[in-house]
Image: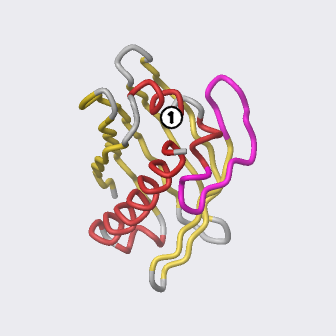
C-alpha cells in the first residue's frame, strides 16, 4: 500500500538559517518524534530507529535513511528511507521530497511531500490512519523545529 502525504509549515527564520539546519540530519533527528540516530554511515547514509504510539497502535522500526539528492541553491532535498518493524513482520519505505521557500526575509515555508509504502500487518491500518499518524508526527516536528530555530 502506497500513501501520499504533503505537509507545509512556516518557520520564523531566514531561509539560509532554516536550510543550514535541515542540511545537517543529526541536528534534525531530535525533532522527529520517536526518532533516534544510531549510526552515521557516511555519504548521506544514516541508520536509526523511529517509533510511534497512536491510540492502540505501538510500532518501532529500525532502518536506514539516505539523502539521494540535495540542491543547496534551490533549497531542495530528496531522501529515501526504509525499515523493518522490530518484533513484527511489517516493513516501511518512503521517498521524501523536501523544499524551503523564502516568503519574506524572516519567514521560510517548508514543504515536505512523501510517498510511504507499508507492508505486513501495519498495512491493514489503511491509508486514512497512516495519514493521521503522519499529520500528528509532522505537526510535532514543525513545532520543535520552530522552537530550535527561534533560539
Query: Residue 101 at what x, y percent from top left?
Result: 29, 29
Residue beneath the point at 42% across and 18% down: 71
Query: What span is colored magenta in the figure?
Result: 30-46
In the rendered view, would you say 79 is above or below 133? above
Image quarter of residue 133: bottom left
Query: Residue 18 at what x, y percent from top left?
Result: 45, 33
Looking at the picture, tell me which residue is in the foreground, 23 or 35.
23
Based on the picture, tell me whether residue 80 belongs to the magenta stretch. Answer: no
Residue beneath the point at 31% across and 70% down: 126
Query: Residue 41 at what x, y percent from top left?
Result: 73, 32
Residue beneath the point at 34% across and 32% down: 106
What is the crowding at mark 1: few (fewer than 14 residues within 10 Å), some, or many (at least 20)? Answer: many
Q: Residue furthest bottom?
A: 56
Please indicate whether residue 86 sits to the left or right of residue 132 in the image: right
Report the quarter where the C terminus lies. top right
Residue beneath the point at 62% across and 43% down: 64
In the rendered view, would you say 122 is above or below 95? below
What residue sits right under mark 1 in the picture?
A: 22
Report the quarter where the N terminus lies. bottom left
Q: Residue furthest top?
A: 73
Asked which secondary structure carries label 1, the reply is helix
Amino acid at each position: 500500500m502506497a500513501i501520499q502525504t504533503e505537509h507545509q509549515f512556516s518557520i520564523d527564520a531566514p531561509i539560509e538559517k532554516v536550510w543550514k539546519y535541515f542540511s545537517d540530519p543529526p541536528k534534525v533527528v531530535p525533532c522527529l518524534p520517536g526518532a533516534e540516530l544510531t549510526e552515521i554511515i557516511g555519504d548521506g547514509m544514516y541508520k536509526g530507529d523511529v517509533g510511534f504510539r497512536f491510540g492502540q497502535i505501538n510500532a518501532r522500526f529500525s532502518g536506514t535513511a539516505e539523502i539521494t539528492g540535495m540542491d543547496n541553491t534551490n533549497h531542495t532535498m530528496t531522501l529515501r528511507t526504509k525499515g523493518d518493524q522490530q518484533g513484527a513482520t511489517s516493513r516501511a519505505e518512503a521517498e521524501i521530497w523536501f523544499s524551503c521557500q523564502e516568503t519574506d526575509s524572516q519567514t521560510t515555508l517548508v514543504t515536505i511531500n512523501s510517498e510511504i509504502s507499508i507492508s505486513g500487518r501495519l498495512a491493514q491500518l489503511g491509508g486514512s490512519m497512516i495519514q493521521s499518524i503522519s499529520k500528528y508526527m509532522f505537526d510535532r516536528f514543525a513545532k520543535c523545529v520552530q522552537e530550535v530555530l527561534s533560539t
